[in-house]
């Protein structure tokens, strides 16, 4: 096992970027299909998935006590999906599960979070590059 010079920060931010990209796609899908009466909107639960990822990497280890046991495998598993809200009746009398205004706010918020994560990763690599250059 190699040395993790960033303490898992890069891996966590990578996971956050993947989840934010998936959330972006989900929001766009919801907006594109909101006029379809049979379409049920969904959401990617980024914060919950990040908590699960951090708990998995929190220093706990699994022990295989029987040859038939399956080991824990790290994978980019599909994120948890949820219906963002229960069906509600809007002012126009429809019972859509997607509120256009809320979806647009979620899209903007998700974009800001994605950009922030990308900037943090860029700064981490910039720091590593600087350390390498200064070490010559």
Image (cartoon, helix red, strand yellow):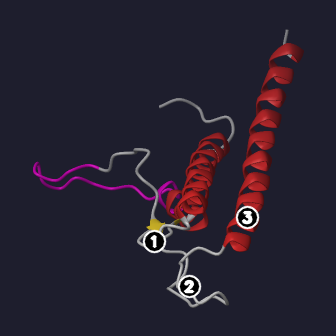
Closest to the camera, between mark 2 and mark 3, is 2
Residue 69 position within the rendered picture, expressed as x and y whole percent measured from the top left: 16, 53
Residue 120 position within the rendered picture, expressed as x and y whole percent measured from the top left: 79, 43
| In the image, residue 58 lies in the stretch drawn in magenta | yes
Q: Which residue is mark 3?
A: 104
- Give the residue at x 86% y 22%: 130
Disc 2 and disc 3 in contact, CB within 8 angstroms? no
**In this view, which residue lies farthest toward the front?**
92
- Give the residue at x 50% y 69%: 41
Question: Start and end of the magenta stretch?
Answer: 55-71
Residue 107 position within the rendered picture, expressed as x and y whole percent measured from the top left: 71, 59
Does label 2 or label 3 sit earlier along the sequence?
Answer: 2
Spatial CA distance of label 2 from label 3 is 19 Å
Q: Which residue is mark 1?
A: 40
Q: Which residue is mark 2?
A: 94
Q: Is residue 58 left or right of residue 132?
A: left
Q: Is residue 134 left or right of residue 25?
A: right
Q: Residues within 10 Å of mark 2 (few under 14, many from 20)?
A: few
Of residues 134 and 32, which is closer to you in this image? 32
- Give the residue at x 68% y 70%: 100
Residue 134 position within the rendered picture, expressed as x and y whole percent measured from the top left: 89, 16
């Amino acid at each position: 096992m190699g040395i993790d010079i960033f303490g898992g920060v890069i891996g966590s931010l990578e996971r956050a970027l993947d989840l934010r990209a998936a959330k972006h796609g989900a929001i766009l899908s919801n907006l594109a299909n909101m006029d379809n009466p049979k379409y049920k909107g969904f959401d990617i639960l980024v914060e919950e998935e990040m908590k699960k990822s951090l708990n998995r990497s929190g220093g706990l280890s699994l022990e295989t006590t029987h040859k038939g046991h399956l080991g824990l495998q790290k994978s980019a598993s599909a994120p948890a999906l949820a219906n963002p809200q229960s069906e509600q009746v809007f002012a126009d009398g429809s019972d859509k599960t997607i509120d256009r205004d809320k979806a647009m706010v979620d899209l903007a918020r998700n974009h800001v979070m994605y950009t922030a994560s990308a900037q943090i990763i860029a700064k981490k690599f910039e720091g590593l590059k600087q350390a390498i250059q200064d070490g010559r």
